[in-house]
Amino acid sequence: MNWKTLALCSVMVGVVFAGCNSSSPTPTTDTGPAPVDMGMTTMPPETHTYIIGLIQTATTDTSGTTAFGFDLDMMHNGMMGSCTDASDFTDPYDMTNMNIDNQLSTALPVLGGMLGADGADGAIRDQIEAGKILLMLTVSDINSYTNDSSVGVHALLGVVTTAACTAHTDMTSCGADTTNNCAWAANTMGGGTCNGAPMPSAACSAHSDMASCTADMMNACNWSMANSNCTGIAAGQTYMQQTDLGMVMGSITNGRLAAVTQMLPLSFVAMGHQINLVLRTVHFGGRITATNITQGEFGAQVLVSDIVSLANMLGLAVDPSTIESFVSPDLMPNMDTTAACAAHTDMASCMGDTANFCTYMTVMGMGTCMGAAAGAHCAAISAGMGYDAIAATVM
């Protein structure tokens, strides 16, 4: 695997997970379903806003058999001979669920080796604590935290505004103001604003060891292997809305929130570039209370073509075959490309047609350009992550 492939892996994980947490908190076994209330309303409707303070891309399972996410293709291990035959994973929060689709997790060991002791999760943590990526969920019309068949789930990106930071009008001067922890937040028009960082969590910094830090999911604490300290953002802070990501209807079953949105557009600055990416068929949820969401998980589709376009924009010359070489697309089977490939009459044009995954075969001295049969290749890669969220207020 060359350096460009490794760099692409880093870009993919950073974008897919809304930024690029240094800890991988130890997943805890679910204590079982909460008591069932038969769907009856048990309290007046409530609305609460939560901010994601911890994001995990990798579990602590060294065997590689567990991964965060959801069953996105509604089958176990897919069907042999098709693009969906990739092996599924086990949910670290529910060991009876062995249908998790998260092929992007197979690339994480490579990325972790590139980024040092804190890996990809450390990079994500830094983005959150610097105020660069503040993903918020407002859950409304909650009549029960045990079972509620209909709640509203509104996703948005927030920012911290401080006078010292908002005084900067360009990305360069903003990023240089490390004294005030300023961070540049891009907008879809090509400009942006200079914002501050959230207040650090005293509850997290009070932990002096990894075990107590990673066990504190209610405060979304992060443990840094590199710095041997526990960090996080404080609960109860007020943020200003930057980007409205839309609202969908969800539900609470046995104490666990669940919702699905068809698209989640993300836009932010990374490595000096404006990054725009759409996550598709996004499933998300977690154990919800009035003050936090714990054992949270996201699962989504990421189009191979979107990753290729993004990589090319960043100066990485890759094609769909490059993507397939280190992570398996496993969702959205493509159409039959036999005819497109058969149109090529020479090996050069055949092998150059990576968009249709053409392969040049020589039999008895005769060359033929072969295409992929329907379902042999997929247009999307499954991705997933874990998260914990704490109480917040949005302006």
Image (spheres, rainbow, N blue to C red):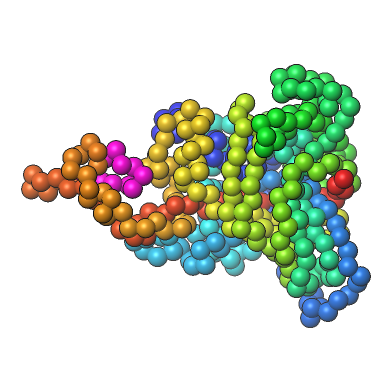
Q: Percent x, y for residue 82?
A: 37, 60
- Is 226 in front, or is 6? 6
355 up-or-down from 173: above or below: below
Is 357 part of what is drawn in magenta? yes
Of all residues, the one furthest to the left in this rendering is 364
- Is 222 in front, or is 393? 393
Task: Give the quarter of the image for residue 160.
Answer: top right
Range drawn in magenta: 351-360
- Is 355 in front, or is 31? 355
Query: In what quadrant of the picture does the C terminus appear?
Result: top right
- Is 250 in front, or is 116? 250
- Residue at 83% in and 25% down: 165
- Residue at 77% in and 53% down: 137
- Residue at 87% in and 24% down: 164
- Residue at 24% in and 38% down: 349
Q: Percent x, y for residue 351?
A: 26, 40
Is 159 part of what is drawn in magenta? no
Q: Percent x, y for residue 363?
A: 12, 49
328 up-or-down from 144: above or below: above
